[in-house]
Amino acid sequence: MITEQDIPSRLDAQMAFLQEIDKLKAVDRATDVFGDRAENSAEHSWHLALYALILSEHARSQINVDRVIRMMLLHDIVEIDAGDTPIFGAADPGIKDAEEKAAKRIFGLLPDDQAREALALWHEFEAAESVDAIFAKSLDRFQPPNQNLATGGGSWKRYKVTRDRIEARVKPPIERGAPKLFAWLSPKLDAFFSRSE
């Protein structure tokens, strides 16, 4: 139970966290946005929260959309310390450890109860075993191809990405949580790559 005496120190901790996560706006991702610039991780998280809100009806299983939205808002906060790992970039073997360390540090700024809840939700997203996390992961893979299609290929050109490579990286997680989304996306990928060849 939170007492009146607890409020100032609780607010100090909450504000320290909220000020720290503002740094997510400075973490550039590989995906472009309109205006020919890189999307930042804060924009990505906000966009995915809206994807969850709008596309929840397409989840393979019954989900708790509020939990998925919370996952989307929290899932990339670790990039403040660990940086973004582009889906088509070179894999960093130490990224999981760096992200775990970042999660503990950043969520640890919160009051203990909120820190435990945020860290548990982040771990749930990373494990992608619950129906909520499976759907959240599917959206995390569904949004970037749509951004690239909307920007004329965006980062696909920089990374020399092929249609087969996209399918290998995004189809399994999208179909696992929302197969209708990949069925909708697939012909759009075909059309884009047939024009690009």
Image (cartoon, rainbow, N blue to C red):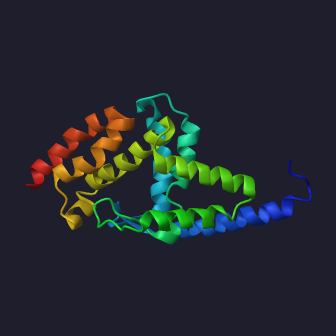
Corner quadrant of residue 134: top left
Q: Residue 30: x, y in percent?
A: 34, 65
- On screen, residue 81 above or below 152: below
Side of 30 where 49 appears, left or right: right
Q: Residue 27: x, y in percent?
A: 46, 69
Side of 104 where 183 appears, left or right: left
- Pick the residue in front: 102 or 88: 102
Side of 92 where 134 appears, left or right: right
- On screen, residue 65 above or below 139: above
- Pick the residue in front: 36 or 124: 124
Point 40% across, 49% down: residue: 140
Q: Residue 118: x, y in percent?
A: 62, 53
Q: Residue furthest left?
A: 197
Point 65% across, 68% down: residue: 19
Q: Residue 73: x, y in percent?
A: 54, 52
Q: Is residue 151 visible?
A: yes
Q: Can residue 25 be seen in this view?
A: no
Point 49% across, 59% down: residue: 76
Point 7% across, 55% down: residue: 197
